[in-house]
Amino acid sequence: MRVVLVSGGVISGVGKGIIASSAGLLLKTKGLRVTALKIDPYLNTDAGLLSPLEHGECFVLADGGETDLDLGNYERYLGIQLSHESNMTTGKVYQHVINRERKGDYLGKTVQVVPHITDAIQEWIERVARIPVDDSGEEPDVCIVELGGTVGDLESGPFVEALVQLRQRLGPQNFLSIAVSYVPIITGEEKTKPTQHAIRQMRSAGLIPDVVACRCERSLDDETIRKIARSCQVQYEQVIGVRNMETIYQVPLLLEEQGLSKLLEKGLGLETLEASLSKARTDKGRELWDLWRKTVVPEKHLPPVNIVLVGKYTALDDAYLSVRKSLEHSAMHCGRKLNLVSVDSEHLEPHMQEKEPTKFHDAWKAICAAEGVLVPGGFGSRGVEGMILVTKWARERKVPFLGICLGMQVAVVEYAREKLGLVGANSEEINANAPHKAVIFMPEGSKEQMGGTMRLGTRTSHFQPDTEWSKLRAMYGGKQVVEERHRHRYEVNPEITGQLEEAGLTLTSLDDQGVRVESIELKDHPFFVGVQAHPEFTSKVLDPSPAYLGFVAASAGMLDQAIAAAATKTKLVTNVTNAF
């Protein structure tokens, strides 16, 4: 078992997740099997009830686990499928240990942070490191472990101690530590003191860095790297500069250029392991690297596609991280530069015209300039009327539209009002006393227990008879049954589905019981699609989500080409040149 630990100092949010994912990708291009685990020191047992404006999106795994957004990065970069155990929190660990204590597993011993909590952490890491995460069904060769927050935080103490013990237990060349730090630039000078203090604190805790990854807005001066190496008791080649790139997908290329692959090979003793790999695995690794390099073309060389994202949590980009990444993946495969503008849906509502007219006019100006409109998921009533207005605008003006989860429900509410004449139609979530409930609370849900009670994880959608014309179905290669991940408490009211279809809104797919609406579509529209699922959670850099790819292609005027490519399982854009 080999472990690569990625931890941080100075400040959080400097890109540990991207560096961890990129390190995993570099290992995978050598033919190795790689898995990943994220440690979040907060007390919550999962990310399901965290505010997206405070913590970013909640990423949903195939098994229904509600996790930190970094697990989305791991899956997107590495093309793997993780489980809920791949996200460890303080709450989960303590709950596990307390449950064991209640069952009498500790035989009357005094249960303490050391050794019981630290042992539980190590056991968790070792268990997750051996779970197969790809189609091979084989045990991974390397596990990437990312420690959230910064070393020195009070809440991360037990995890740091456990990782120090794990390094000692695994022995040389089985554990490599990457310390991510930040080098600020003040009046043009690169300051190394924050990094020096951060590494000193890591060393005092027992986490000896094998690699120091220095985040900075620009390429670090050679003298800065030498100074950090001297101060942190590492060799010159163990310090790598991680400057800002045009896209995060170019970070693996930068790290390869900086020599991280060689450091990983040496630190983990991979020469022997690589020599034992089959030719098929090494060839697959090389093919992955070649394809990655050819796909992540710098955006400045591409014509733009203008998309507007109309949501409730636009104040924080990470709140819709997977949506943004899915649009990026699709734009790359369409050979387009994504020009994404976020609009707070509340700013589109009429009351804003008097309250804050500048925001109102700026919001609608952005809408009018868009080539495609996307309404993502969300919870609560704020801004929903704005979503309904922009949905109507896209429907009537034949602008490509994609509604995700709440976005689909909003499209149904708008259609019920405008085409069915159901005045005051709404979602039960927005108005429990609405005269016409177009969207209702799912009967199997719980209104008392909030955490973990939604319809979560991978579910099947079955395209209905006579939907061969469906643009969404065509993007899935004409399949009758598809799988996507879900996260919702409300559904389209089955009592009005017949009326909706009679009025022209086709329910193109239903659940496995043939009752719950999974997707809607307008036949006489360039691209008007709503899906109850969250297809962004399965989109990959090298394999974009069919729903998102269809939407971006339609916005770029390339939908016919996209459908043809999906039917023949070929690349949409084949003339993209490698700019590296």
Image (tube, grey):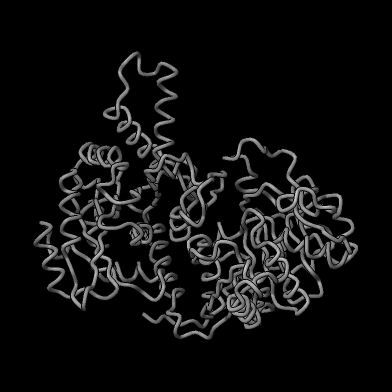
Q: Which sits in the foreground, 57 or 343?
A: 343
Query: Where's residue 295, x and y in %?
Result: 46, 74
Is 450 above or below relative to 97? below
- Residue closest to the far front: 354
Q: Residue at x 59, y 68 (%)?
A: 344
Q: Quadrant of the N terminus?
A: top left
Residue 125 or residue 454, whichever sits in front: 454
Does residue 142 appear anywhere in the picture?
no
Location of residue 253 by image quarter: bottom left
**Measuring 25% from the left and 75% from the top, which residue is drawn there?**
219
Q: Is residue 237 above or below residue 297?
A: above
Q: Residue furthest top?
A: 108
Quarter placement of the C terminus: bottom left
| Viewer-closest of 265 and 426 | 426
Classify 354 as above or below 459: below
Across and down, in percent, residue 445 comes to 69, 39
As drawn, 478 above or below 155: below
Where is residue 44 drawn, in percent x and y? 46, 40
| Numbered label tally | 0
Q: Is residue 40 left or right of residue 202?
A: right
Residue at image location 40% in from the left, 57% down from the top: 281
Instruction: Write down the quadrant of residue 418 in the picture.
Output: bottom right
- Residue at 22% across / 51% down in the picture? 269
Q: Residue 178's image quarter?
A: bottom left
Question: Is residue 405 visible in the rendered structure shown here?
Answer: yes
Image position, residue 528 (x, y; %): 73, 70
